[in-house]
Image (spheres, rainbow, N blue to C red):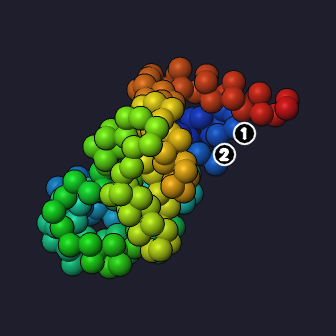
Amino acid sequence: MLDSSCRILQDWIQSHPAFLNLKLAVNISASQIETDNFCAFILETLEKYELRPEQLELEITENVLMQDMELVVSKLNRLTRHGIHIAVDDFGMGYSSLSYLQTLPLTNLKIDRSFISTIQSVGDKNSIVSAIVAMAKELGLHIVAEGVENQVQMDYVRDIGCPTVQGFWYAHPMPTAKLKLIALQQYNTAQSA
C-alpha cells in the first residue's frame, strides 16, 4: 500500500504543480512496525519515488503503541528525525495510558469518529472532544476530527478550535482519478480568484 500510494503521489506531482505540497497519510499496523526492516523500507520507498519525508504521515492506532513501546518509540524517533510525520489514529478508542503522548514523537492526533458522531444538534456539548482538543493543543499537536458528517458537527469542531476535519461532510471515498480531477478543479479555481 505504501509503495503504490507513493507511486501515485509521484505521478501526480510530476503531472501538475498543484500537487507539489500534498501530504500522504498511510496507516501502519503492529506487524509492520515489528519487522526488522520497517524504517529502511519507509525511507527507501520515499527515496525510490523522490518524495520528501515531510510529505509522508504514518498513522498508528493506540493498540499498535501498546505492542512493544520501547521498540515503537525507537523506530518512530528514527523516522521523525528524517522529517516523517506521525499521527495517532482513532484516538480515544484504546485503553492505554496517556503518558505515551509525551513519550512518542507525535505530530498529529486524530479524534475517533465515535466521539464526533454524538454531536447531533446545535447546543450539544461534548466535553470529551473539547478536552481532547485542549490537551492536544497544550502538547503542540495538530488535531484532526474524524467522521464529520454534517454542518452541526463541522460547526462544533470549528468552534472548539479543531483546525482540520475529515469525513463524509467533504467527500466519500472515491477513485484516485476522480480525486485528482476535483483537486485540479479546486486548484484552478483558486488560481483564477
Q: How many angstroms separate mark 2 from mark 1 (CA)?
A: 5 Å
Asked if residue 134 is positioned above or below residue 10 in the image, the reply reads below
The residue that mark 1 highlights is 17
Asked if residue 83 is positioned above or below residue 22 in the image, the reply reads below
Q: Element at badge 1?
A: helix
Dot 2: within a 10 Å radius of its alpha carbon, few (fewer than 14), some, or many (20 or more) residues?
Answer: some
Asked if residue 112 is positioned above or below residue 150 in the image, the reply reads below
The residue that mark 2 highlights is 20
**Left or right of residue 34, residue 6 in this image:** right
Residue visible at 63% across and 30% down? 183
Residue 61 in percent (x, y) is at: 26, 56
Q: Three-letter amino acid code at disc 2?
A: Leu
Residue 144 in percent (x, y) is at: 45, 51
For the N terminus, give its image quadrant.
Answer: top left
Residue 106 in percent (x, y) is at: 40, 68
Residue 188, quarter of the rendered image: top right
Answer whether residue 87 is visible to the viewer in this image.
no
**Left or right of residue 190, residue 69 in this image:** left
Viewer-closest of 102 and 73: 102
- Labels 2 and 1 touching (C-beta < 8 A): yes
Q: Element at badge 2?
A: loop
Q: Three-letter amino acid code at disc 1?
A: Pro
**Left or right of residue 9, residue 79 in this image:** left
The label shown at residue 56 is: none
Residue 108, quarter of the rendered image: bottom left
Answer whether residue 101 is visible to the viewer in this image.
yes
**Left or right of residue 59, residue 140 in this image:** right
